Amino acid sequence: MRLFAQHGYAAVSMRQIARDVGVQAGALYNYTPDKQSLLFDLMQTHMGDLLAARAELPMEPDPVAALKAFARLHLRFHAERPDEVFIAYMELRNLSDDNFTKIEEMRRAYEDQLEAILRAGIEQGVFRVADSKIATMAAIAMLTGVNTWFRQGGRLSLSEVEQIYWEMLRQAVGAQSE
């Protein structure tokens, strides 16, 4: 994971991976059939863990509370896993067609959960969003983007960033302040 995150999937060889984990290059194939399988396993694990973390959240009947919980989970989950996030979002292009399809299904399942929250808020009149799909993609892009600049021990704590991002997201969907 570290090698893929630092150098990019295409630049890392199986020989480098073997050296990094302390085995001979040939021995590595006892653990994985190829580099593509390693990439797919990393992405599948990341998405599986994200979906599992989301499933552990209590279901909020109030769309505003549900959106806030979703945003907080997304920010915290991703802030704790910068290498996984980089790989999961930047290395999609290197997946085989079959593996890409499987990861996209998992991503869609996660996105659909956010879109369901937005649609519920629109139906209840608490969100003003022109297109729930576009709003979903924009929200996920905004929340995931924190990983490009946030560092523990920086000017703002994760809690402060969460609050600022929540306010921006709340305003973006037209929800009233709490």
Image (spheres, rainbow, N blue to C red):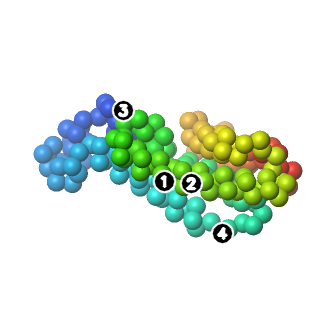
**Contact, CB < 8 Å: mark 2 with mark 4?**
no
Residue 69 visible in this rendered orientation of the protein: yes
Disc 3 packing (10 Å; few <14; some 14–19; many ≥20): few
Which label was assigned to residue 58?
A: 4
Q: SS for tag 3?
A: helix
List the residue tagged with mark 3.
7
- Drawn side of residue 24 relative to residue 72, left or right: left
Q: Which of 44 and 129 is in front in this view?
A: 129
Q: What residue is shown at x 23% (from left), y 51% (from top)?
A: 32
List the residue tagged with mark 2.
110
Q: Which of marks 2 and 4 is in front?
A: 2
Say what amino acid the circle numbered 3 marks: His
Q: Which residue lies furthest to the top in this view?
A: 11
Q: Nearer the viewer, mark 4 or mark 1?
A: 1
List the residue tagged with mark 1.
106
Where does the N terminus fall, quadrant-wise? top left
